[in-house]
Image: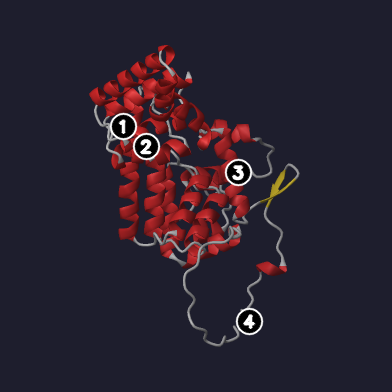
Amino acid sequence: MSYSINLGSWNSVFAVPCSVVDDNLKLAGSVQLKVLLWVLRHAGEPFEAKDIADALGIDRADVGDAMLYWRENGLISVDGETLSPPASTAADEKVEPAPLQQKVAEPPEKPHHLLSRPQKPDSEFVAKRMAESKEIACLMQSAQQILGRLLSGGDLATLLMIHDDYGLPCDVIAMLIQYAVNAGRANMRYIEKAAIDWADNDINTHEKAEGRLNLLAKDQKAWRTVEQAVGSPHRAPSKREESLAPIWVNEWKFSPEMIREAYDRTIDGAGKYQTAYMNKILERWHKDEITTAKQAADEEAEHVKARSSHKSGNGKQEKQKKYTFDIDEYERTSMNDTKE
């Protein structure tokens, strides 16, 4: 008589490295875990990224990102077209750290501006910091949720660099990421650039970050006012527009009607929309305290009258026109004063 043990679904099992649970279960996303489990289940079988994507119902790009995550975390290595566990090295063995030399106490240095871009930490150091600090691990998870996508090893390294090297606290970084998403600039390059600006301006507390975000929100509202006044489709402003819109709306207090009037005159005078040209019109109106459409119309009528007098008048009238009413020439030549 022969005997057998029926373990049901446990008759067919495959091994999962302990490090997946010990080091990565909290940090890895669902797609990353699914891809790894699929790969481990089909060990010894040839497959392509398309096979994984079709089986899991995800994009090939997501498969590539997941594989990159596990490579950067030292779980797999790639040799040509073969996946395998990473080769063990002497560096993998636990070694007692050498005692640190005690440094002579020095007076604390004052905070200084960032002179150059620090080097990003490698994936091993990122994983170590996340394992050591719950705050760092929570930041990475929060960032992934806010951005709505899996973070690559490079993204994680950038966020850690913003915290460790730029000195921004985790809650401030999360606020910055949320702002980037709301502003339609949810990419790590913009987030890092903004983080450098915040660090240089000591925006390093929750209260200071709130103040900066309130100011940015006010600037965004000013751009929307300009955008709607000129009838432009919704888009992100250029750097020049981003700096001028708050001046036009918040500082000089121009109404949408006046902004539209300046825009129309820009089209008539320049033949197309020119930010610098439009700024010169509004700058002149602000200087001359022209704040209503009627005042602008009266000024334009006086301008037309002066030009007409110049065509039929004498040299005295020509001199008066050149001194007082040469607005067209002023706006035309001043377009090149600043770059867009």
Q: How many other residues sit within 10 Å of disc 2, few (<14), some (14-19) or many (≥20)?
A: many
Image position of 87 with respect to 316: above or below: below
The one nearer the camera, 199 or 37, is 199
Residue 98: mark:
4
Q: Nearer the viewer, mark 3 or mark 4?
A: 4
Q: What is the distance, in whole Å, between disc 1 and disc 2 at their CAs? A: 8 Å
Image position of 149 with respect to 290: above or below: below
Q: Is residue 74 left or right of residue 210?
A: right
Quadrant in which residue 211 is drawn:
bottom left
Q: How many other residues sit within 10 Å of disc 4, few (<14), some (14-19) or many (≥20)?
A: few
Q: What is the distance, in whole Å, between disc 3 and disc 1 at their CAs? A: 53 Å
Q: Secondary structure at mark 1?
A: helix
| Mark 4 or mark 2, earlier in chain | 4
Check disc 1 and give the amino acid type.
Thr
Residue 172: mark:
none
The residue drawn where x is 60% and y is 43% is 39
Q: What is the distance, in whole Å, between disc 3 and disc 4 at their CAs? A: 39 Å
The residue drawn where x is 34% and y is 52% is 212
Q: Secondary structure at mark 2?
A: helix
CB within 8 Å, label 1 to label 2: yes
The one nearer the camera, 280 or 1, is 280
Residue 245: mark:
2
| Mark 2 or mark 3, earlier in chain | 3
Check disc 2 and give the amino acid type.
Ala
The residue that mark 3 highlights is 39
